Image: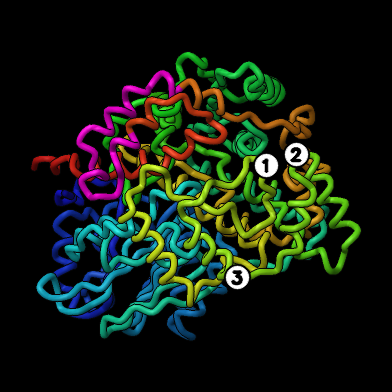
């Protein structure tokens, strides 16, 4: 089904090659589409791809090279000192050397025949790796920042079984979340680095672990203020103009931090169709107080609804993305930003997971602070209308993550969790949708069961796991937005997903950061003097339920169009008749229509792989 991908059609990608002649064939194929080629000290290709000028900085010390690619302020001198440390000690010296660098970036190094490559602590900056084998190449491992690029270089085929897992409602659970859709292509987990030996072997290693949450709010808010403003400054420094979202409290903090710099800031607020949405009100107060920000409100009638254009999308994403259903709503603002002349757009994505956190953190405090924990549990139960008995039962449940995942595999076709299900378990259990074929259910169950022997939670305990797993998932959406925006010539930056910002937030004491009694207290305290006082203590958050329900009615024909000649149907993963009947129904946005999101994402993704544009002419 899938046609060959033209690497020249992609705006940005890179491949990391080991220092061996065995990689020559893969290197030659990558070089034929690349605009940049950095070499090992041996002269062999090392870092090959397409990236914007200025986004990569290289430091050289003797026969050691260090490259930093992304949104950062690393100077050639700093990169050179990092290369010297790696040459003197080992590549592990880069753990300490890069631990203070602000921004979001990939770090790649070559020294003594060893190559190291790493992304971030969550899945915004990803690393994929695969072993090329004859006849594509001699047996050798290579790495890349896009899964589809790697699949094209080694000739990997689509794994239909893996695609079946993507049909799960609520997303694929850890450790299978974000896995590539091609046979033999693997994803490096966040907080890990990959070493490519000269003999072609790939070895992953953990280089990051979450900090202990022991910093008081007063100290933590000062630290967050420092790292968040530094993260914004890294992006805005040296630019004449930047654009930014201006909606909820998280994006407001980013916008206000940007306004302190020298770049002209142009902010965009999308009005919601729901009259209860108050983002425009708060945005106007912010702009009025700042006095220097150019502000554009996009009227609700000009904003795309959910499911808009889903039958005509041609974005080349390297994995299916549930963001697909809201693609036109998201990209509409970026279109406007690009027309305004922006090369960089700041977003507040990531703030919810870090700043609101999860009530599942209560598991960690029930033994040491039972009275405080039970008081907070009552607060959450009242706030979210949870049945108290069910919430308490989840709180005292000590079953392992592996046990939870085994139940998920067993119960794939059971009814979904109730709408008032407390959020204290390892996660809300995903389910296969009603239109998934028995073959798709069997494939998903087999993959989940196969990973059980080695399955460990993403973090220490329920709360840390839920937060990091959520950051992995939403940061991948942010990454997909970046892939959608790249053809517009605009970089989408999400400072909350920077390693230093994540560390600063997770280090704060849990009761200070996550509480039912205050709205995001950490960012509220951190932004004193930066966000206007009337806005800083805002405790509301808009949602797009109205956009979902109206979009479903208005774009029903587009949903039905995806059922015609369904690629998922051809693969035997979806019963098209059942899916078509669902698309014709009146569905609740809260409990039913969300079931369509993963399936739409997979169907659109498969179609987009067939519509890959030809490379530009000479």
Q: Is 220 located above or below residue 253 in the figure?
A: below
Residue appearing at x 23%, y 43% in the figure: 567
In the image as oriented, which residue stretches furthest toward the right? 371
Give how far across and how far down residue 414 sits, in percent.
50, 51
Question: What secondary structure characterizes most of the magenta part?
Answer: helix
Give how far across and how far down residue 541 sits, in percent.
67, 32
Please state which of residues 281 and 404 is positioned toward the viewer in this rendering.
404
Q: Is there CB contact under 8 Å for labels 2 and 1?
A: yes
Compared across the picture, whether 373 is left or right of 330 comes to right
Give how far across and how far down residue 496 sits, in percent.
59, 49
Q: Secondary structure at mark 1?
A: loop
Question: Disc 2 versus disc 3: distance between alpha carbons?
Answer: 34 Å
Q: Which residue carries the number 1 mark?
A: 420
Please state which of residues 228 and 305 is positioned toward the viewer in this rendering.
305
Q: Is 246 located above or below residue 92 in the figure?
A: above
Question: Disc 2 versus disc 1: distance between alpha carbons?
Answer: 7 Å
Label 2 neighbour load within 10 Å: few <14, some 14-19, many 20+: some
Q: Which residue carries the number 2 mark?
A: 385
Q: Of label 2 and label 1, which has the lower sequence position?
A: 2
Q: Is 187 located above or below residue 111 in the figure?
A: above
Q: Which residue carries the number 3 mark?
A: 209
Q: Of label 2 and label 3, which has the lower sequence position?
A: 3
Q: Secondary structure at mark 2?
A: loop
Q: Is there CB contact under 8 Å for labels 1 and 3?
A: no
Compared across the picture, whether 240 is left or right of 600 comes to right
Residue 533, image quadrant: top right
- Which quarter shows the C terminus? top left
Residue appearing at x 30%, y 54% in the figure: 13
Discs 1/3, front: 1
Residue appearing at x 55%, y 42% in the figure: 349
Start-end of magenta stretch: 551-579
């Amino acid at each position: 089904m899938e046609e060959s991908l033209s690497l020249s059609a992609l705006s940005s990608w890179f491949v990391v090659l080991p220092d061996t002649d065995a990689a020559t064939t893969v290197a030659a194929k990558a070089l034929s589409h690349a605009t940049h080629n950095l070499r090992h000290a041996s002269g062999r290709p090392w870092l090959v791809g397409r990236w914007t000028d200025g986004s990569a900085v290289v430091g050289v010390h003797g026969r050691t090279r260090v490259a930093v690619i992304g949104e950062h302020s690393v100077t050639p001198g700093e990169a050179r000192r990092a290369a010297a440390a790696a040459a003197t000690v080992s590549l592990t010296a880069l753990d300490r050397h890069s631990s203070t660098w602000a921004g979001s970036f990939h770090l790649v190094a070559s020294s003594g025949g060893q190559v190291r490559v790493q992304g971030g602590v969550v899945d915004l900056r990803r690393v994929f790796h695969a072993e090329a084998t004859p006849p594509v190449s001699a047996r050798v491992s290579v790495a890349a920042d896009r899964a589809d690029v790697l699949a094209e270089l080694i000739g990997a085929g689509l794994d239909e079984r893996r695609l079946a897992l993507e049909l799960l409602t609520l997303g694929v659970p850890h450790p299978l979340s974000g896995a590539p859709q091609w046979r033999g292509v693997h994803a490096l987990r966040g907080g890990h680095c990959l070493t490519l030996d000269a003999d072609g072997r790939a070895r992953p290693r953990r280089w990051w672990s979450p900090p202990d949450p022991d910093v008081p709010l007063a100290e933590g808010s000062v630290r967050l203020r420092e790292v968040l403003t530094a993260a914004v400054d890294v992006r805005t420094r040296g630019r004449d103009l930047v654009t930014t979202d201006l909606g909820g409290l998280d994006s407001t903090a980013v916008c206000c931090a940007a306004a302190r710099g020298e770049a002209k800031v142009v902010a965009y607020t999308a009005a919601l169709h729901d009259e209860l949405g108050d983002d425009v009100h708060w945005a106007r107060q912010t702009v009025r107080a700042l006095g220097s920000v150019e502000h554009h409100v996009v009227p609700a009638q000009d904003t795309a609804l959910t499911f808009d254009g889903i039958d005509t999308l041609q974005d080349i994403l390297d994995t299916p993305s549930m963001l697909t259903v809201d693609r036109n709503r998201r990209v509409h603002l970026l279109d406007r930003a690009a027309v305004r002349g922006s090369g960089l757009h700041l977003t507040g994505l990531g703030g919810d997971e870090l700043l609101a956190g999860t009530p599942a953190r209560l598991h960690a405090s029930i033994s040491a602070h039972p009275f405080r924990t039970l008081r907070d549990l009552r607060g959450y139960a009242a706030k979210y209308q949870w049945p108290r008995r069910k919430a308490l039962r989840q709180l005292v449940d000590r079953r392992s993550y592996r046990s939870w995942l085994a139940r998920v595999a067993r119960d794939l076709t059971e009814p979904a969790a109730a709408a008032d299900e407390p959020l204290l378990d390892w996660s809300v259990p995903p389910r296969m949708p009603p239109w998934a074929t028995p073959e798709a259910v069997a494939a998903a169950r087999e993959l989940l069961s196969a990973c059980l022997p080695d399955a460990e939670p993403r973090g220490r305990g329920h709360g840390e796991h839920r937060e990091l797993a959520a950051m992995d998932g939403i940061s991948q959406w942010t990454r997909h937005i970046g892939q959608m925006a790249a053809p517009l010539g605009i970089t989408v930056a999400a400072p909350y997903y920077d390693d230093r910002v994540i560390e600063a937030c997770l280090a704060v004491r849990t009761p200070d950061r996550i509480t039912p009694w205050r709205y995001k207290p950490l960012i509220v305290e951190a932004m004193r003097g930066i966000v206007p006082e009337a806005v800083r203590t805002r405790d509301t958050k808009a949602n797009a339920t109205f956009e979902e329900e109206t979009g479903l009615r208005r774009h029903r024909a587009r949903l039905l169009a995806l059922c015609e000649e369904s690629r998922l149907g051809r693969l035997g993963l979806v019963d098209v008749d059942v899916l078509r009947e669902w698309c014709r129904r009146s569905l609740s946005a809260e409990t039913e229509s969300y079931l369509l999101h993963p399936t739409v994402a997979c169907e659109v993704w498969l179609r987009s792989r067939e519509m890959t544009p030809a490379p530009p002419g000479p």
